[in-house]
Image (cartoon, helix red, strand yellow):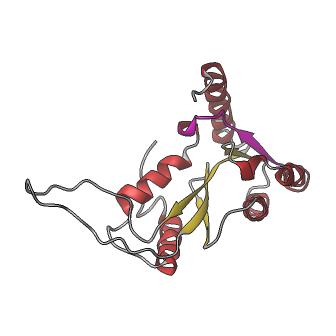
Amino acid sequence: KKRDPIAFEQATQQIEELREQAARGEIILGYVDETGFSSTPDNRYAWTKIGDVHAVDAIRLKRVNVMGCLLSTGKLVTSCLQESVTSTWFYAYLTGIAQQVKQTYNLPLVLIVDNASIHRSKKMADYRELLKTNFSTNLYFIPAYSPELNRIEMVWKQMKYYWRDFQVMTADKIEQWVEKVSNQFGKEYMFTF
């Protein structure tokens, strides 16, 4: 399937307007998504001599699902689960972010999300209304097949391919590492868009 080029261009312009509003201090903008980290790091390139086989033992341990939000303030807010992310978990996570933003900045919050089923579920539609009413928080849905519009995708890539040590980790170690990245984001863990 392909993305709609007109919808993509419109979304690009609308997100740029939201970024400008955030830069002027009118709103807080957040990029939200989920990802998963397995006990073994994602494949990387390796060189071997001709005829040799490069192999790493695959150890199957528990996977850790991570919900993340990259805020226009520069803060990275993450939450780890050792189970599937559901609409209820997602709502609880967004509520925590919305409460933090309301208490700290008292500005409207716009969260950019993709069209994952947990974001678009019937249950989440009700939750979206609660977020809007209680916390002045709105979700902005990017067009299908447009992950580059959600900046947190770049954070996930950095975490999986550049910042993570190439070693097997237990679920608890993954959670500790994700927390470390969140706490040190913008200091020890940095990159530019």
Where residue 106 appears, as percent x and y from the top left, is 79, 55
At x 68%, y 63%, the residue is 85
In which quarter of the view is residue 56 placed?
Answer: bottom left
Work out which residue is located at the far front of the displayed protein and give it. Answer: 51
Asked whether 56 or 66 is in front, the reply is 56
Quarter of the image containing the N terminus?
top right
At x 13%, y 57%, the residue is 48
Work out which residue is located at the far top of the displayed protein and give it. Answer: 6
Q: Is residue 14 magenta?
A: no
* Position of residue 190 in the picture relative to residue 140 (left or right): left
In the image, residue 184 sits, relative to residue 59, either above or below, namely above
How many labels, in total? 0
At x 62%, y 31%, the residue is 16
* Position of residue 160 in the picture relative to residue 30 (left or right): left
* Position of residue 55 in the picture relative to residue 181 (left or right): left
Segment tinted magenta in the rendering:
137-147
In the image, residue 106 sits, relative to residue 38, either above or below, namely above
Where residue 83 appears, as percent x and y from the top left, is 64, 71
* Position of residue 63 in the picture relative to residue 111 (left or right): left
Where residue 82 appears, as percent x and y from the top left, is 60, 73
In the image, residue 92 sits, relative to residue 130, either above or below, namely below
In which quarter of the view is residue 166 placed?
Answer: bottom left
Asked whether 157 or 182 is in front, the reply is 157
At x 37%, y 56%, the residue is 161
